[in-house]
Structure formats: C-alpha cells, structure tokens
Image (cartoon, rainbow, N blue to C red):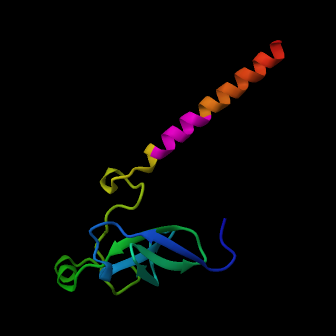
Amino acid sequence: IQPNGAVKVSLPIPSGMDIGRIEVYRVNDDDTRTLMESTAEGDVVVFYTNHFSLYAVVERAADDEAAASGNTSAGSDKSIAPAAAPLGAGESSGFNLLWLLIPIVVIAAVAVILVVRRRAAAQNR
C-alpha cells in the first residue's frame, strides 16, 4: 500500500548518534540509496515521503573520517558512516523484531486451536 500524497514519518534516533550528522536514506529496490530531506526533532528524525519503503537512519562521517576511508554514498557526494543497526535488524540493535513476532505467532496459533476445539466440542453435543 502506498500513500496518496506525502506523509510525515518520524523515526527514533539511535542512541549515541551525533544529531548534527543524522541523515535518512531510502533504500531502493536496486540497493541504491536516495537521500531524504530530514530534520531532527528531539529524539526523532522527521521526513516526508510519498513512497513507503526501507529507510536507513545514518550518521554522516566526519570529513576526516570519510577522506581516510574513502566511504561515499551512491548517488550523493556526501560521505556516510553506517549508524547502529535499524530496528529489528539483529542483535546489535538491542531489539530483534523476530523476538516480537514469535510470541504473536504462538498466541495466534493457540487461539486458532482453541476455537477449533470449541467448535468441535459444540458439534459433538
């Protein structure tokens, strides 16, 4: 589902990131990145988009770090350094989305089993 017009997106800024160097990129289907115009508002970074996709909150490398590493982004003259892993991207982020999905799936399976058993018991009466 895609929005019909622009929507405001707010993403939490990972702890330890320099707010002055925060950038948001849309990760395109072909793995290229598009720099989004964004602003930091408190503990979130805000941007507008008309396309739901995968977005990455990154911390732009300091000029001396970028020159030493030669790390530049595709389609942009700005250098970036990867931020902490995005939410649900693995153990390094402190939160793994899989650990949220497993209990939801288990609860849904138990609910389905209970409904089926109750219907079977009601038909046997």
Determine which quarter of the picture holds residue 99. top left
Residue 110 position, x and y percent, is: 60, 29
Q: Main secondary structure of the magenta part?
A: helix
Determine which quarter of the picture holds residue 41. bottom left
Residue 3 position, x and y percent, is: 66, 72
Q: Is residue 85 left or right of residue 35?
A: left
Q: Is residue 29 left or right of residue 17?
A: right
- Tell me what residue is drawn at x 58 percent, y 69 percent: 52
- For the C terminus, give its image quadrant: top right
Q: Is residue 115 left or right of residue 11?
A: right
Residue 123 position, x and y percent, is: 83, 17
| Of residues 51 and 111, the one drawn nearer to the viewer in this rendering | 111
| Of residues 19 and 37, the one drawn nearer to the viewer in this rendering | 19
Decide if residue 58 is in sight here: yes
- Tell me what residue is drawn at x 31 percent, y 68 percent: 83
- For the N terminus, give its image quadrant: bottom right
Residue 120 position, x and y percent, is: 77, 19
Q: Is residue 109 above or below residue 48?
A: above
Q: Which residues are magenta?
A: 100-108
Decide if residue 73 is in sight here: no
Q: Is residue 70 left or right of residue 103?
A: left
Q: Is residue 6 above or below residue 116?
A: below
